[in-house]
Image: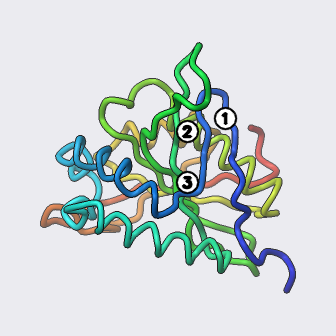
Amino acid sequence: MEDFLTEIPDTPIEGERVTLRLLHEDDADALFAVIDGSRDFLAEHLPWPAQCLDADDVAARIESWEIQAEMANGGCWGIFESPRGLTSGDSRLVGVIILGWIQVLHRSATVSYWLGKPFTGRGLATDALRALSRFAFDKLALNRLEITAAVSNPESAAVATRAGFTPEGICREYEFINGKFVNHERFSLLVRDPK
């Protein structure tokens, strides 16, 4: 197992309508624009938007994700949409998907994702989750992926379900958001599950 995973490969991951690419510091301005344009929408279910006040804050987060990828602990991919009929150079950053807490011994990891508000409801998060799941199983040799979604966020739970994840139960008071503890539903996908 020692040579199982030493670094997350920095190669694009192709979905049907999105491309996932590990984020780097030069993506900070574009990512900040997505966050800032959807700040209230994101803050409804996520604890961190108030900590991303400018592109420098976002660059610091990207740097920590780059370190995690170099250590094979996880990574943060930008979700890039390429509108039909346009070249890949016309793709735009619409959100992120994160593979975190990779446990080498147990071959497991967590997944989280978000999109800017204008890009929701079109299946982009589901496409991104399916693509990252294939990558995690096929290229990283993981066995289990896990997602938690606030019970007050049925749209996020629907993404997990559409991507083949199985509900496992409720995690009571899992996260502290907007001054209150929030329950989350836990989902998992195993390499052997039907996709």
Q: Nearer the viewer, residue 83 or 116?
A: 83
Task: Return the residue at label 3.
Answer: 77
Residue 165 percent coordinates (x, y): 61, 45
Helix, strand or loop at mark 1: loop
Residue 74 percent coordinates (x, y): 60, 69
Disc 3 and disc 2: Cα gap in Å? 21 Å
Q: Residue at x 55, y 38 (%)?
A: 161
Q: Nearer the viewer, mark 3 or mark 2?
A: 3
| 114 up-or-down from 143: above or below | above
| 43 up-or-down from 180: above or below | above
Q: Amino acid at mark 3?
A: Trp
Residue 119 percent coordinates (x, y): 38, 30
Whichever of callouts 3 and 2 sits on the residue coming sooner in the sequence is 3
Q: Amino acid at mark 2?
A: Thr
Residue 15 numbered tag: 1
Helix, strand or loop at mark 3: strand
Q: Residue at x 62, y 76 (%)?
A: 73
Residue 142 percent coordinates (x, y): 76, 63
For mark 2, does the 10 Å Cα neighbourhood hold few (<14), some (14 to 19), or many (20 or more) residues? Answer: some
For mark 3, does the 10 Å Cα neighbourhood hold few (<14), some (14 to 19), or many (20 or more) residues? Answer: many
- Outermost residue on the left side: it is 179
| 91 up-or-down from 186: above or below | above
Q: Amino acid at mark 1?
A: Gly
For mark 1, does the 10 Å Cα neighbourhood hold few (<14), some (14 to 19), or many (20 or more) residues? Answer: many
Whichever of callouts 2 and 1 sits on the residue coming sooner in the sequence is 1
The chosen color scheme is rainbow
Q: Are marks 1 and 3 in contact (CB under 8 Å)?
A: no
Residue 161 numbered tag: 2
Disc 1 and disc 3: Cα gap in Å? 13 Å
Q: Nearer the viewer, mark 2 or mark 1?
A: 1
